[in-house]
Amino acid sequence: MIITNVEFVPNKTITAHLGLVTGGTVRAKNAVKDFGASVKNMFGGEIQNYTELLKEARQEALDRMVAQAAALHADAVINVRFSTSAILEGAAEVYVYGTAVQLQ
């Protein structure tokens, strides 16, 4: 499956728009890692646990969107966008969406 953040697939012709496909997840790290992150926050620098949290959440959301597109027999998802928001301290929502299409 081709995933792209532009409105077309280079060197391909879109033959059908199948509609909006989405994926989302809310993820949180455990309390021990949250405590470590709060200590790191006092001194500055990257909080690797949260970096990993968002990486995992983006992948899970993307996998869910791709599964939805595959169920529609899409060849690609175009114009893909991510949205991230904090749900509560230590938890983040990641939402991804795009347009499922069939290609010639």
Image (cartoon, rainbow, N blue to C red):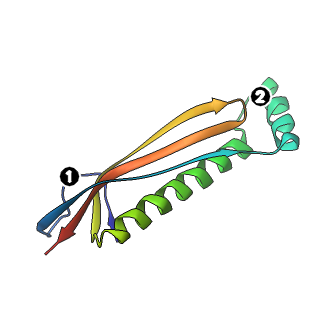
Q: Name the residue under label 1.
A: 7
> Is 63 drawn above or below residue 54 in the view shown?
below
Where does the N terminus fall, quadrant-wise?
Answer: bottom left
Q: Which of marks 2 and 1 is nearer the N terminus?
A: 1
Q: Where is residue 66 in the image (x, y as percent from the top left)?
A: 41, 64
The residue that appears at 14% across and 70% down in the rendered structure is: 12
Q: Which of 70 and 14 is in front in this view?
A: 70
Q: Position of residue 70 (x, y in %)?
A: 36, 70
Label number found at residue 41:
2
The residue that appears at 37% across and 70% down in the rendered structure is: 71
| Three-letter code, disc 2 | Asn
Assess whether mark 1 and mark 2 are in contact (beta carbons under 8 angstroms).
no
Q: Position of residue 76 (x, y in %)?
A: 28, 66
Where does the C terminus fall, quadrant-wise?
Answer: bottom left
Residue 70 as seen in the image, left or right of residue 93:
left
Q: In this rendering, which labeled residue sits more in front, label 2 or label 1?
A: 1
Q: Where is residue 13 in the image (x, y as percent from the top left)?
A: 11, 68
Quadrant in the rendering for residue 74: bottom left
Label number found at residue 20:
none
